[in-house]
Amino acid sequence: GVDARKGHGGLASPRFTPPPPTDVLETLEGGGIWCLELHKRSNLVFAGCWGPAHQVDLIKAWDATSGAFVGSLYGHFSDVKCLCESGPLLWSGSYDGSMRCWDVATMAAAPGPAALVVAAGPVLALAATPARLFSAHDDGAVRCWDAATGEHLWASAHPGPVTALALRGDRHL
């Protein structure tokens, strides 16, 4: 007979026991989470959230080891759809068309002209190097920005929404 605990090829199926509910899973009453990003340098997990219309959209952070709530980052005016680590910084993108840069050490907006970059429409995905920020949009555009100045450098067009970006090294998107 077939061992019900075995998957294809006779390999044991992985078992998953969900943890008990904790504050790590709480966002806003009536809200939810669009995305998660593990910031490796700080060992913090960030969640891009959305809330009910009467509440501000935000980013929440927890310690990845203990699960302790660390704090919230406020600044977007619509759903926070994507997050991206870039060294000591965290970039966030929103349906409000803005991309914000956060200093993870201070849990505040990063100083400088690139702390807020405004694009032409909802930001669906981000990728970053120390020098460049790449954004993907629902209009099919992929845009490249100077990460230090916020200057728009170039754009490419695609026939439909671009919902994910990935970098290979510092030179290949």
Image (tube, rainbow, N blue to C red):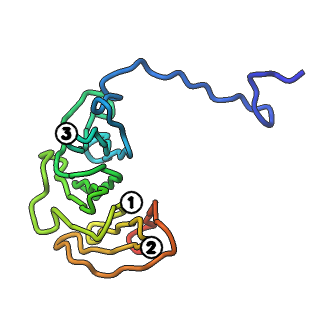
Residue placed most toward the observer, 147 or 27: 27
Residue at far top of view = 20
Q: Is residue 59 placed above or below 152 in the rendered structure? A: above
Residue placed most toward the observer, 87 or 117: 117
- The amino acid sitting under disc 2 is His
Identify the element where label 1 is drawn.
strand
Mark 3–mark 2 distance (CA, rounded to whole Å): 32 Å
Mark seen at residue 172: 2
The residue tagged 1 is: 125
Q: Which image quadrant for residue 46?
A: top left
Residue depicted at 35% across the width and 44% down the height: 38
- The amino acid sitting under disc 1 is Ala
Residue depicted at 19% across the width and 39% down the height: 72
Q: Is residue 121 placed above or below 15 in the rendered structure? A: below
User: Mark 2 or 1 closer to N-term?
Assistant: 1
User: Mark 1 or 3 closer to N-term?
Assistant: 3
Identify the element where label 2 is drawn.
loop
Q: How many numbered discs, if any?
A: 3
Mark 1–mark 3 distance (CA, rounded to whole Å): 20 Å
The residue tagged 3 is: 72
Mark seen at residue 62: none
Q: Quadrant of the N terminus?
A: top right
Specify whether 37 is left or right of 68.
right
Q: Which image quadrant for residue 135?
A: bottom left
Which of label 3 and label 2 is nearer to you? Answer: 3
Q: Given contact means CB atoms under 8 Å apart, are the residues at marks 2 and 1 in contact?
A: no
Return the x and y of residue 137 as percentages of the image width and height.
39, 66
